[in-house]
């Protein structure tokens, strides 16, 4: 995925998130946190390569 595609997807997600209620936002943040935790080692490895 290119940086342009990633930026476009982030923009689209931010618009949807802005319209979401508190419960939906909390659920989304919990899913993001879970994904970050699940992929923590991969993220750390990728950051070391930069």
Image (tube, helix red, strand yellow):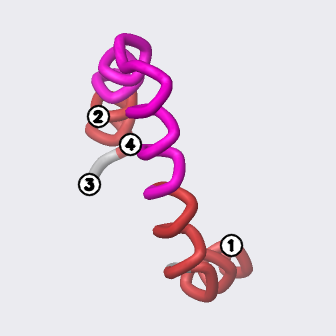
Q: Quadrant of residue 47?
A: bottom right
Structural distance between the alpha carbons of marks 4 and 3: 7 Å
Residue pointed to by mark 2: 9
State yes or no: discs 4 and 2 in contact (Cβ < 8 Å): no
Q: Which residue is mark 1?
A: 47
- Residue beneath disc 3: 1
Q: Alpha-carbon neighbours of circle 2 within 10 Å: few (<14), some, or many (≥20)?
A: few
Measured along the vertical axis of the image, is residue 49 above or below residue 3?
below
N-terminal-most mark, 4 or 1: 4
Left or right: residue 23 versus residue 4 is: right
Find the magenta span and give its range: 11-31
Give yes or no for residue 17 being in the magenta stretch.
yes
Disc number for residue 3? 4
Q: Which residue is at a point 35% across and 11% down the rendered structure image?
A: 19
In the depicted structure, whether residue 21 falls above or below residue 24:
above
Q: Quadrant of the C terminus?
A: bottom right
**Residue found 51% across the figure and 68% down from its top:** 34
Q: CA distance from mark 2 to mark 3?
A: 10 Å
Q: Residues within 10 Å of mark 4 (few under 14, many from 20)?
A: few
> In 3D space, how far apart are the residues under numbered discs 1 and 3 (Cα atoms)?
18 Å
């Amino acid at each position: 995925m290119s940086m342009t595609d990633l930026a476009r997807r982030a923009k689209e997600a931010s618009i949807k998130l802005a319209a979401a209620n508190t419960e939906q936002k909390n659920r989304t943040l919990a899913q993001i946190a879970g994904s970050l935790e699940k992929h923590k080692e991969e993220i750390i490895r990728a950051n070391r390569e930069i």
